[in-house]
Amino acid sequence: MMTLTRTVCVLGLSFSLLACPKKTDGASDAAADAAPAPAADAGGAAGDDVESVYPLDPNAPIEPLAQKLCAGLSEMPEKKRAACCSTTPGIVVAPECTRVLSAALRHKAVELSEASVDRCVAAFDKTLEGCDWVGPFPPGPPPECQGLLKGLLAEGAKCRSSLECAGSLRCRGVGPTTAGKCSPARAVGELCGGTTDTLATYVRQNDLDTQHPECVTGHCIKHRCAMPVLADGACQVTLDCAAGLQCLPVAVGAKKKSAAIERKCLARPIPTKPGEACPGGICGEGLQCIMNKCASRKAGGEECANDFECRGGCVRTGTDPKGRCGPRCDIR
């Protein structure tokens, strides 16, 4: 999955066109990463100018469908938050999202239907009804907003995002300033991770690794494609484990008091009731593992002890130690 660091890196590129450090993926990606070096000009050495994989072109037309989707994903939640908090909207990435997505559509690298965009925007609008979601953990786009783009580029084609690749192909070697190549998922033992997908970040495609897996096994562990950990194998998180297993703490040692705690992949039923412990970090549908217990985030007005329990935040007034869930405009 893309990390916060990667996201910040992409956004920084979009506004300043400064290159983020790029991780080398090895010899297998040499062809995809290779690019002719720019010639030196009279004022400086070669390589001074760095451009995004989606270069700025002030004369390029904007695609209305791209504008509609990007406004729904970025502008809409910020405007709703501003209305709830009686303030002005903050900075949004909708213009850059629109520019990048428009380029992908113009170049026939992706396909996007108006019906799917309308479903996404309507579902997200419903998710953001009211104001009790405002706070440090705002809801992201709903399932209707995932898998919107259909990639049209065949295996071996130059690409600027995995979303441009057909089927389950992945854009191997892509970065904010480097194009990649549409390629099949990597085999066990190959390097993985360390790249940033600009388009996927802007259009908030959180299911990128499911739709376009980087590894044949679907597991990138410590920057290597790996087999999922089988029953009784050592693990760090449940994502390391094979399907149907959870990464759970177990005591190892003859004596209880001196026993060490290790984590192993074990077959245990997924907790499905509010209040149940979730040592594996996962819960049944509709619940989240919050403070080591399965729960639904509380709606506005419900009693709370901390922000983690609420859709928005835990608001305290006066000297009352107890809080009530509601919008927290002081934090984001």
Image: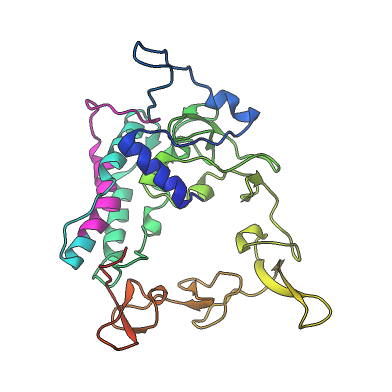
Colour option used? rainbow
Q: Which residues are magenta?
A: 52-79
Residue 101 visible (yes or no): no
How many marks are shown on the rendered structure? 0
Residue 312 in picture, x, y percent from top left: 32, 71
| Residue 327, placed above or below residue 109 | below
Q: Is residue 285 shown left or right of residue 234? A: left
Q: Residue at x 51, y 35 (%)?
A: 22
**Residue 77 covered by magenta stretch:** yes
Question: In the image shown, does 282 or 26 lie closer to the viewer?
Answer: 26
Task: Give the quadrant of residue 112.
Answer: top left
Q: Residue lying farthest bottom?
A: 320
**Residue 227 covered by magenta stretch:** no
Q: Tell me the quarter of the image containing the C terminus.
A: bottom left
Residue 141 in picture, x, y percent from top left: 36, 57
Q: Is residue 18 shown left or right of residue 75? A: right
Residue 249 in picture, x, y percent from top left: 68, 72
Q: Is residue 7 shown left or right of residue 96? A: right
Q: Residue at x 55, y 82 (%)?
A: 276
| Residue 98, placed above or below residue 51 | below
Residue 64 visible (yes or no): yes
Q: Residue at x 53, y 50 (%)?
A: 210
Task: Give the quadrant of residue 279.
Answer: bottom right
| Residue 195, placed above or below residue 227 | above
Q: Residue lying farthest top?
A: 42
Q: Residue at x 32, y 32 (%)?
A: 103
Residue 314 in picture, x, y percent from top left: 33, 77
